[in-house]
Image: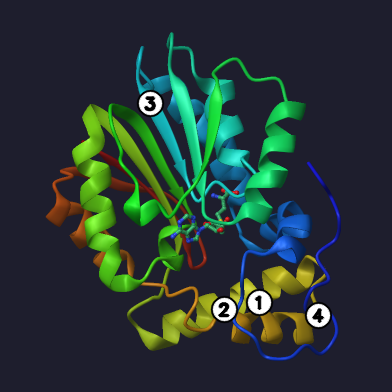
Amino acid sequence: MSNKKDDIFAKPVSPLPFRFDESVAEVFPDMISRSVPGYQSIIRNVSKLATHFVTDNSNCYDLGCSLGAVSLAMSSGITANNAQIIGVDNSSAMLERCQHHIDAFKHSTPIKLIEADISKLDIQNASMVALNFTLQFIAQEERASLLQTIFDGMNEGAVLILSEKIRIEEQSLDELMINLHHEFKMENGYSALEISQKRNALENVLVPETIESHHQRLKNVGFSSITNWLQHYNFVSIIAVK
Ligand SMILES: C[S@@+](CC[C@H](N)C(=O)[O-])C[C@H]1O[C@@H](n2cnc3c(N)ncnc32)[C@H](O)[C@@H]1O
């Protein structure tokens, strides 16, 4: 994958909302690994979960696939026969680079890419679905219907991996987690200016919810087995089994 350094917010920029455009796609692997605590651990474990959950002749969906890290991790773990992976994103800049990455890495399970809005997608015969830091970018009022569509398209025993930045209900703890996350970014080479400009750009674009809201919504759409399998500061990954 491209390892170009993320310096998008290094100089003063005009205050525009964050977009997954060409400039972000170009530096995305560096941006996500220096910004999201636990990201590499999630990717490694997607592979293990794929070994466990993906069944013969089924579909795996990577929703908001960006450059395909989750799709490739699924592919490396799948031992089932005749499964296929469908990566979906609505950013053409991301998908163009994603196709190059997929072509460059060996993968035995086929990966098909679709440019589409995931909230208008048809999901069928799924044994694994991943929303790895994507739901937080979907309008809050559309999140329940997207999760319902996903649940309805999943087979019995299938797994949803939902990773999100979260908000902590208690304000003092929320502030603590935000500060620890900013320290994490500083340790990874981001300046105070970069951190504050990115935070402003993400305001109202990335809308975090509490872990309780996520669990409740998952229960409401029908999931009965739900657990957080990873938390690092205000970043959580949940698995929900149908
Ligand atoms: C933080 S990135 C996801 C990271 C990726 N899943 C990974 O693990 O490397 C969010 C992605 O979701 C995509 N996205 C946001 N809203 C979307 C929508 N409504 N439909 C499809 N893709 C969307 C963005 O273009 C972006 O590539």
Question: What amino acid does circle 1 point to?
Answer: His
Q: Earlier in the sequence, mark 2 or mark 4?
A: 4
Looking at the rendered structure, the secondary structure element under dot 2 is helix
Q: Earlier in the sequence, mark 1 or mark 3?
A: 3
Q: Nearer the viewer, mark 2 or mark 4?
A: 2
Residue sitting at x 61%, y 40%: 68
What residue would you read off at disc 4? 191
Residue sitting at x 41%, y 73%: 208
What residue would you read off at disc 1? 182
What label does residue 202 carry, if any?
2
Q: Are marks 2 and 4 in contact (CB under 8 Å)?
A: no
Q: Position of residue 56 (x, y in %)?
A: 36, 12
Q: Are marks 1 and 2 in contact (CB under 8 Å)?
A: no
Looking at the rendered structure, the secondary structure element under dot 1 is helix
Q: Is mark 2 within 8 Å of ligand 1?
A: no
Question: What amino acid does circle 4 point to?
Answer: Ser
Q: Is residue 184 left or right of residue 12?
A: left
Question: What amino acid does circle 2 point to?
Answer: Leu
